[in-house]
Amino acid sequence: MSYTFSGKRRPSCSRRSVPISNTAAMGRARMIVGVCRISLLIHGNRSLKDKRQVIKSLIEKVRGRFNVSIAETGSNDLLQRAEIGICAVGNDGAFVNSVMDKAVDFIEGLHTAEIIDNSIELINL
């Protein structure tokens, strides 16, 4: 038996948009998105290759330890500066904020880069 499929079909979907204010009334759990921006200073760095190695190691350690999304988001061409972004999602604001605080403390404890500035924002959806 052979099946043929020609052309691209989109699956039909009966999704209905619900205003955010009505989601709590329908029994849906709320979603908290935590976003953290960290500016770093990497001392003793002589090349972009050295910088990438330090940032890649830091990103892998944080991702493995805290199960968050993390990426280098700015200052890509500067030798001794880096900016990383961290994101976590949950249904409890205190938990998401705690994860962000612990990630910042962990990065500070690694002593591979100095934290110049950081900001944490929680978004309720």
Image (cartoon, rainbow, N blue to C red):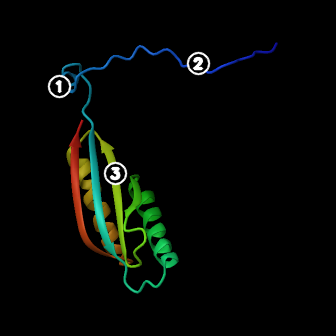
For image coordinates 27% across by 36% down, the residue present is 31
Identify the residue position indicated by label 3 in the image. Answer: 87
Q: Percent position (x, y) of residue 90? A: 30, 42
Q: Amino acid at mark 3?
A: Cys
Location of residue 24 by image quarter:
top left
Identify the residue position indicated by label 1 in the image. Answer: 21
Mark 1 lies on a secondary structure that is helix
* 73 w.r.t. 107: above or below: above
Identify the residue position indicated by label 2 in the image. Answer: 9
Name the N-terminal-most of marks 3 and 2: 2
The answer to whether residue 84 is left or right of residue 120 is right
- What distance separates the C-alpha of mark 3 from that of mark 1? 24 Å
How packed mark 3 is, by other alpha carbons closer than 10 Å (few <14, some 14-19, many 20 or more), is many
- What distance separates the C-alpha of mark 3 from that of mark 2? 34 Å
Q: Nearer the viewer, mark 1 or mark 2?
A: 2
Q: Amino acid at mark 1?
A: Ser
Mark 3 lies on a secondary structure that is strand
Q: How many marks?
A: 3
| Quarter occupied by the C terminus | top left
For image coordinates 32% across by 61% down, the residue present is 103
Q: Residue furthest right?
A: 1
